Amino acid sequence: MARTAVTFLGSGDAFNAGGRGHSCYLVEDALGACAVDFGPTALMALRRLGKNPAALDSVLVTHLHGDHFAGLPFLILDGIYRTPGRGPLTIAGPPGVEERVRSLAAACYRDILRDAVPFDLRFAEWTDNRPGEIAGRRVLPIPAFHQDLPERAYSIRLESGGATLAFTGDTGWSDELVPLAAGADLFVAECSLWQGGYDRHLGSANWQKLLPQLNCRIVASSHLGDDALAHRA
Ligand SMILES: [Zn+2]
């Protein structure tokens, strides 16, 4: 069984609560490296750890909120200007991901994607509950409860080097959380709130309900807001 390493590049909410970077996870395995989400602080986090951004073969985007994908223009910029010969990069995400990333990139650097970039930039869209292969890894996108249509949010189950990894993006309670984590080696779930008050994020009441039902090796909370951090003990 090949070894898989997961590094938290950030574990904060959209507001960088506690000085934490936006929630983002680096997965390294025998195939290479991918990231789950890529918010504005992700590239900085990679650099701080001495990781090569161009080593990322794919980014798996849970949903199109800025703290989860707005770092992508800088990753693309890095591939164009800082890493000649960069390998292919697949950006996979909810329906409309290519248009949103291209619009965002154009807002940041108007002409950056006007012409072909000097590496193979690909896009792929999630289909509800349909497993697909992204850069050689099996990925299962599971609908999350977080946004109104036409926006779609997902949790992700990822097979990497013999390990099963499960990540919520942002989500409120869903009965899909238990099967999402079933048998996983690592389950990362958001905990934006503590007392709650907003049903499209998880808080303490959800976690108390969820924990006894989980069947996985390691559970980690992430996307921590101020209130959750204040109660982390
Ligand atoms: Zn969100």
Image (cartoon, rainbow, N blue to C red):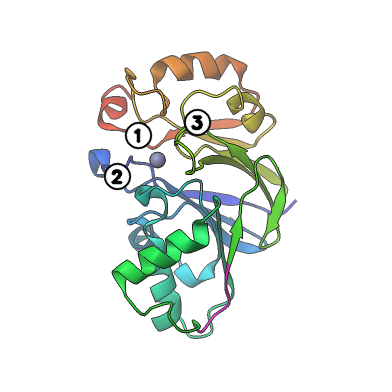
Which amino acid is tagged 1? Leu
Q: Quadrant of the C terminus?
A: top left
Residue 37 included in the magenta stretch of the image: no
Where does label 3 land, which residue? 145
Residue for point 43% across, 77% down = 113
Q: Which residues are magenta?
A: 118-122
Which amino acid is tagged 3? Phe
Residue for point 33% across, 40% down = 13
Q: Which mark is residue 45?
A: none
Where does label 2 land, which residue? 20
Ligand 1's quadrant: top left
Q: Is residue 141 left or right of residue 106?
A: right
The Cα atoms of the two marked residues, 2 and 3, are separated by 24 Å
Residue for point 35% across, 49% down = 67
Q: Which mark is residue 224?
A: 1
Which secondary structure dominates the residues rendered in magenta?
loop
Residue 27 horizontal/vertical position (percent):
55, 53
Sequence-wise, which precedes: disc 1 or disc 3?
Answer: 3
Name above or below for residue 70 compared with residue 118. above
Quarter of image, res 71: bottom left
